[in-house]
């Protein structure tokens, strides 16, 4: 099989020459996946030189159709051989994959997917290393931050039953910290680990030795979202992926604030971070979990970027300058001492992020319902000049950001 690609207007046209059997269909599937990963969501397929197609080829076409339709892209078969038309018809997919290809005189060819109405476009902004499309959603809304617990108890792993509080996270809130899914302290005592919550969904990494992330997504409700700004971003190909730090700086700038809350869904180039290996309710020494050499038993670190080419849900808060009461839970994000933050990420199996303006609740819930949760990390950066492994990096995606106006505390 030979696969050729060319730009045709705002589409990528892929011309296939040769058989689409069980072996070669996977090659076409890989080529389509790569085109989508590169950011192309409008694809046409020329199958006029395909003499044979099996059900394996049909599977590839249907997968691409569903993937692009779900993100308001388009996938059309611009031309097909008679054998391909016959196989598609016998598969019962003619109306889906193969509307009438020959248009009437003076008419345009019908696409294989009826396109949804075009999404609203935002303000285009160019910044170092990337391009942004910014949407103002609810300019009157500001975020209130509620700090629960005493982060100082983590040193020495001194969390006990009296420090445990149950919390429900509505769709209008997001959260991150150390927690577990369960009904009581006794139920969760040996499983407390990093967690994040957004749009009502919760994901966390248990510290019970299984190393298998868990999650909970409640039933749908009609509670409105509270995000203020949404921004699409894409790294420039000539400068490589965008790090977490420049994305946070962009969010602060777009929100026009010194303290912000951020939720992001993005395609990853790799995540850098750490996760608890043991619950912080079980101290063996006053130096746990941070002092060497015991830190190796308490925390696992990504020595190099993990979860590359995945889709990440990132939740966090950031501040520039005086963080106020938030300072107790924020740490430097990079070499700039006045830029601090706290971010957790849940890594999912890959799928492309829809272009244009998208809904936070629908996007987050779709991740939990349709993708596989791979892991949860507390994001860290290593900016040492020589040995440093750098920070988490992203290729493209969307983030929602809002200024934090009030901070309340509940120390335990």
Image: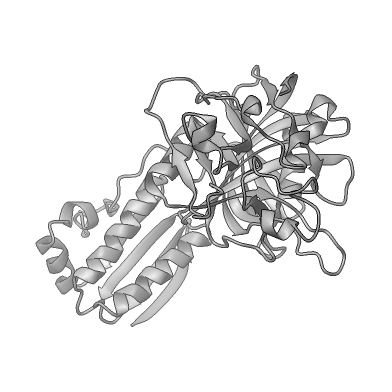
Residue 333 visible in image:
yes
Q: Residue 128 vs residue 162: left or right?
A: right
Residue at x-position 48% and y-position 56%: 10
Q: Is residue 80 visible?
A: no
Quadrant of the rendered image containing residue 235: bottom right
Farthest front residue in view? 284
In the rendering, at what x and y percent does residue 177 appear?
64, 37
Q: In this view, does 344 lie to the left or right of 46?
A: right
Position of the C terminus by quadrant: top right
Question: What residue is drawn where x is 15% and y is 72%?
Answer: 82
Chosen colour scheme: one colour
Q: In this view, does 41 lie to the left or right of 159?
A: left
Q: Which residue is drawn at 23% across and 70% down?
A: 56
Percent of width and height locating residue 231: 62, 39
Image position, residue 276 (x, y; %):
64, 50
Frontmost residue, 105 versus 20: 20
- With respect to residue 74, does 160 lie above or below? above
Residue 245 spot, x, y in % from top left:
76, 48
Quadrant hosting residue 344: top right
Judging depth in this view, the residue of 388 and 3 nearest the camera is 388
Q: Looking at the picture, does residue 302 appear above or below residue 16?
A: above
In the picture shown, does residue 336 fall above or below 389? above
The residue at the point 38 percent across, 47 percent down is 370
């Amino acid at each position: 099989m030979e696969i050729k690609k060319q730009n045709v207007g705002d589409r990528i046209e892929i011309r296939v020459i040769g058989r689409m059997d069980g072996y070669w269909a996977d090659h076409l599937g890989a080529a389509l996946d790569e085109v989508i990963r590169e950011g192309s969501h409008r694809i046409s397929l020329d199958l006029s030189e395909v003499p044979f197609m099996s059900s394996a080829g049909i599977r590839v076409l249907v997968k691409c159709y569903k993937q692009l339709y779900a993100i308001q892209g388009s996938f059309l078969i611009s031309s097909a051989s008679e054998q391909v038309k016959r196989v598609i018809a016998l598969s019962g997919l003619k109306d889906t994959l193969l509307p009438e290809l020959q248009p009437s005189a003076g008419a345009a060819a019908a696409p294989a997917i009826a396109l949804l109405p075009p999404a609203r476009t935002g303000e285009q902004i160019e910044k170092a290393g990337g391009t942004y499309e910014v949407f103002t959603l609810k300019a009157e809304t500001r975020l209130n931050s509620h700090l629960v617990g005493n982060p100082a108890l983590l040193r020495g792993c001194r969390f006990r039953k009296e420090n445990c509080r149950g919390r429900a996270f509505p769709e209008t809130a997001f959260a991150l910290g150390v927690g577990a899914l369960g009904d009581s302290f006794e139920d969760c005592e040996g499983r407390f680990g990093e967690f994040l919550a957004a749009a009502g969904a919760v994901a966390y990494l248990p510290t019970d030795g299984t190393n298998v992330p868990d999650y909970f997504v409640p039933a749908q409700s009609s509670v409105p979202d509270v995000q203020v700004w949404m921004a699409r971003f894409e790294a420039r190909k000539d400068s490589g992926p965008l790090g977490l730090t420049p994305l946070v700086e962009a969010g602060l700038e777009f929100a026009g604030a010194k303290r912000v809350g951020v939720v992001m869904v993005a395609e990853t180039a790799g995540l850098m971070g750490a996760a608890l290996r043991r619950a912080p309710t079980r101290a063996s020494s006053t130096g746990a979990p941070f002092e060497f050499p015991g830190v190796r038993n308490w925390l696992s670190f990504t020595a190099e970027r993990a979860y590359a080419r995945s889709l990440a849900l990132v939740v966090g808060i950031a501040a520039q300058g005086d963080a106020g009461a938030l300072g107790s839970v924020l740490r430097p994000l990079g070499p700039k001492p006045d830029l601090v933050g706290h971010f957790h990420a849940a890594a999912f199996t890959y799928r492309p992020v829809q272009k244009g303006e998208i809904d936070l609740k629908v996007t987050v819930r779709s991740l939990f319902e349709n993708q596989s949760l791979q892991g949860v990390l507390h994001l860290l950066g290593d900016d040492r000049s020589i040995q440093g492994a750098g920070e988490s990096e992203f290729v493209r995606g969307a983030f929602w950001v809002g200024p934090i106006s009030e901070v309340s505390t509940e120390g335990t």
